Image: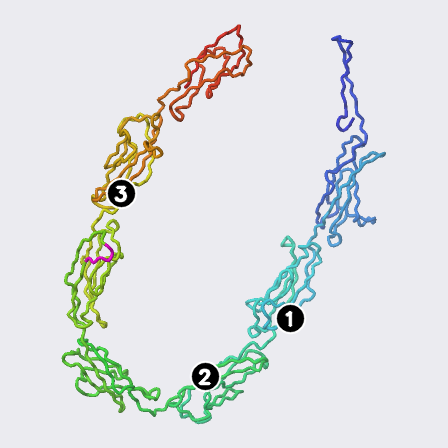
Amino acid sequence: LDHETQSVVVLTVQSQLGNSPVYSSTQVNITVTDVNDNPPVFLTKSDRVTIAHTQPPGTAVYIAHAEDKDSGLNGVVKYSITSKHIAKDYDDVHFEIDSLTGDLFLSKELDYETTSHFLLQIIVKDSNSNLPQNDTVFLSIDVEDQNDHSPYFQDDFVVIGVEENAPVGTLVYTFNAKDGDGSFLNSKIEYSLEISNMAENPFLIHPSYGTLTTAFPLDREMARSVILTVSAADQAINLTDRRFDSLTVKIVILDINDNSPSFTSSPLSYVMEDAEVGFLVHHITAKDPDEGRNGQVTYHILSGNENKAFVLDKLTGILTTAQVLDRELEEHYSLTVMALDDGSPALSTTQVLTITVLDVNDETPVFLKQVYETVIHENQDPGEFVIKVEAVDRDAGLNSLLQYEILPGTGYEKFRINSGSGEVVSTASLDRETQEIFSIKGSPSRSSTAQLSITVLDENDHHPMFAKTQYQISVREDLEEGSAILDLVASDEDDGLNGKVTYSLIDDTFGAFAVDSVTGSIVTTNTLDQETKSQYTFRAVASDCSTHMPRSTTVTLCGITILIEDVNDNVPKFEQNYYKATVWEGQNPKTDIIQVFVTDLDSGLNGEAEYSILSGNENATFLIDSAQGVLATNAVLDHENTSSYRETAASHHLVLLASDRGSPSLNSTATVLITVLDVNDNPPVFGSPEYHVQVRESIPVGSHVAGFSAEDWDAGANADVTYAIVSGNDWGHFHLDGKTGSLDLVKALDYEDTMKFTLIIQAT
């Protein structure tokens, strides 16, 4: 027996004498007394809770619960705790448990930094004093840290030195802040950086490691030192609880010789050619932003002073003449000057100093040529440019300014010279037939002279003219490529190249035509297609070959029109090669079935199509409208005799023919599949009008008695047959399956009751 399964057993005891129907009974209640055979059991063997270390004593931490299936004192349990963290000293006991309820309380304040984890063993025992039973659960208690310590640096102020040539990414310093908190986030430190004396921070601090590195190239000449504020903040989850500390860092950027001297003086200087030896020519200056010896500059001439014309003081940069200068021998000096600092290694820069020797007026002007020859066209308006003459004076400035004039002579009055530029222009219209050559003289303000010879050329003063201004022709579209279709004729009264005519076409001919530029013959350059383009209109140009001023005459828009005549070169095409159509059986003759269409790109009779039935129309069952392409019945169709006129049987498909009226005629064919749709015009028919069946009266209910089958010549749903008993089954002995026609026995037969059944079966 098990008290926990059934504490009371109820029995009914009955007494009876022999086979006597008389008996008596009584009820016996048996109480099963409990023994302490079930230990108390926790629902889990281990559990974990978390508590903030700021919770006060008395705070409920956990509720232990165990079950004991026994009853009475055997089922009453008591709780107790033990832990390796609970010492004998009462002051170290942090938790207490209510022995009856299992409620676990905090008995002493917690400190995460002292103890961050407790492992308690909670024991439950029943109240049996003789043989108590027990169970244990292990409770893991995590103390949650509170952010009650701030990060701190060892120093309040740090001075660091770094050279200005330190590469980007160079480690400058590593900051190490401490935090007394215990948990990860409360003691995890993140570093940040602020700058106070620069717009852009050239340094970068790693937020986790505190490493300070260079983020950009440093330049002591831009900033000698940088003041930074480095902050260290913990990463408490609640942003308002985060704590931080900061320190000030001064980074001194150490100088290296990384700047070359740069010139501040002008690269240009001027000196008169009659200056005395020792004359100050130029003061060369350069600056170097580096410190100390790195910024001390000396000056040197590297090249350009091969004739020792100048002397340079290397400390002061003073440049003076060392000999008398002559502008006519050397007008410009280009000295390559170097500025060199005293660093190690030394850096330098160079400058090209251009010294211009100023002129003294001591030279006579001279024409570049003694005789100038040129040509000018006749019939030009006055003011036509003829030629430009030029004289030079080796002096400079005002000393070299020249004035030109034409000396009197035959025909000199027909020309004028610009006194400042030397340009000669005509003052009258010239006629080559009156005077072909002019010889005139000109001179500058001093004694030099030059002769100018001018020849008058013939002018291109006649236009090419077409023999006709309008052309219109017709050509067949099957003309071969390269065929000549028209000859243009134009003439020009001028001589030579001025009278030689060339031909060209303007406007788009769509790549169909071209003109021979010499003969004027227009030829086809592509295959013509009247269906694509039936007419071309464009213009032709006749131009002379003058290289100076060609003249031309243009044929107007109506000038050249080419009409393309159609040729029967396109086959009439059906829209489909294969058609499908349906028609109900029993329809009257002349019932439309389908209309077919063809397209023929030709025009006129070449594009008119006629329809006919080429094959498959045995017994003239169908007919087609020769003009409209409408296919219709020519007889009453029967689905049961012929279901389709199709391509799979030679005698049951229609091949249609479409022919145009061109000469010769072109044609194409298409196939039509005609399906004759069924009409429900046939009743189902049994295989026999009467069925005789014999059965034994003892056959069991559910036995198959007979099967009936009727056939319907229609198709689809029209041929689906259903069966029913119309009469003879008044007593319900039989059941007929409406779909299969199977007759089954559903009620037992009795020969003595009924010897024969006559059933009327209907097929629908």
Q: Residues within 10 Å of mark 3 (few under 14, many from 20)?
A: many
Q: Quadrant of the C terminus?
A: top left
> Which mark lies nearer to you, 1 or 3?
3
Q: Please tell me which residue is depicted at 78% across the width and 26% down the height of the picture.
A: 1
Q: Residues within 10 Å of mark 2 (few under 14, many from 20)?
A: many
The type of residue carrying mark 2 is Leu
x and y percentages locating residue 35 in the rendered image: 81, 30
x and y percentages locating residue 112 in the rendered image: 73, 52
Q: Is residue 335 left or right of residue 491?
A: right
- Is-magenta flag for residue 505? no
Which SS class for mark 1? strand
Q: Is residue 713 left or right of residue 301?
A: left
Q: Which mark is residue 160?
A: 1
Residue carrying label 2: 353
The type of residue carrying mark 3 is Pro
Q: Please tell me which residue is depicted at 21% across the width and 71% down the height of the picture.
A: 546
- Asked if the residue at tag 3 contacts the one at tag 1, i.e. Cβ–Cβ closer than 8 Å, the answer is no
State the extent of the magenta-drawn residues as a range: 480-485
Question: How far apart, in angstroms, are the residues tagged by discs 1 and 3?
Answer: 97 Å
